[in-house]
Amino acid sequence: MIADEGRAGSEQESGGWPDIPGDTAFTIKIREADPLVRAGFPAHVTVLYPFMHQNRLNDLVHSELSRLFARHPSFALTFTEFGRYPGVLYLDPQPHDPVKALTADLTRRWPELVPYRGIFGTGLDPHLTLANHEGPATQDAAYDALQAELAPLLPLRCHVDAVELIVWDGERWQSQAKYPLGQPSADSVPDSTRTAGLREGT
């Protein structure tokens, strides 16, 4: 399941969280963070889980998704702080607003889609799960140690220029499509980049 929060364990056991083949979701892959992740999936920030079933996706939907995502400028995320949910150690991506704007646009267009199937109420803030394998008795000591190990590798900064549609095949999540974001606004370009461009006459 892409929703990797430890709090979902009891929901999954009671039948409230089962992924079925053909389920889809939108994620932002953070490949720069892959070496930090100790969970069994690539580093990512979830935009919307779940989306519509794969059987409902057609050319019209893909075209609409392409236009929707292109309206959002590409942006940078910076990871400097750790956070925790019960059973989960994560990195906090800043700023949250660009990711939340993507989620809001999708759910505004398809209001029947409820983030995390409503298990977490109105949803969760954007986050990048590092580990989710510890229980209540071990999580504090284990995640204190892991956080101390990974802290020297921060801050981590990445540029986000696309959102990926992934599909559950019954065993794992597979990449299905990639939707480019629009060009970044001038305000999102670092001053040093703009200055270099001016020096080069671009």
Image: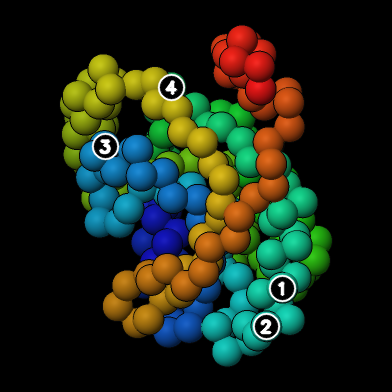
Q: Quadrant of residue 88?
A: top left
Q: Does 166 appear above or below 142?
A: below
Which of the labelled discs sits on residue 36, or is there none?
3
Q: Does 107 appear above or below 125?
A: below
Q: Mark 3 to mark 1: distance in Å?
A: 35 Å
Q: Pointer 1 and pointer 4: residues touching (CB < 8 Å)?
A: no
Q: Pointer 2 and pointer 3: residues touching (CB < 8 Å)?
A: no
Which of the labelled discs sits on residue 80, or is there none?
4
Q: Nearer the viewer, mark 3 or mark 1?
A: 1
Label 3: how many residues lie within 10 Å, few (<14), some (14-19) or many (20+)? Answer: some
**Badge 2 or badge 4: first in the primary sequence:** 2
What is the secondary structure assignment of the residue under circle 1? helix
Report the amino acid beneath label 3: Leu
**Badge 1 or badge 4: first in the primary sequence:** 1
Q: Quadrant of residue 128?
A: top left
Report the amino acid beneath label 2: Asp
Q: Nearer the viewer, mark 1 or mark 4?
A: 1
Give residue 8's position: percent from left, percent from top.
43, 59
Whether residue 130 can be seen here? no
Q: Give the position of the C terminus as an image quadrant.
A: top right
What is the secondary structure assignment of the residue under circle 4? strand
Q: Pointer 2 and pointer 1: residues touching (CB < 8 Å)?
A: yes
Residue bearing mark 1 = 63
Whether residue 40 can be seen here? yes
Residue bearing mark 2 = 59
Say whether residue 151 is left or right of residue 104.
left
**Badge 3 or badge 4: first in the primary sequence:** 3
Q: Nearer the viewer, mark 2 or mark 3?
A: 2
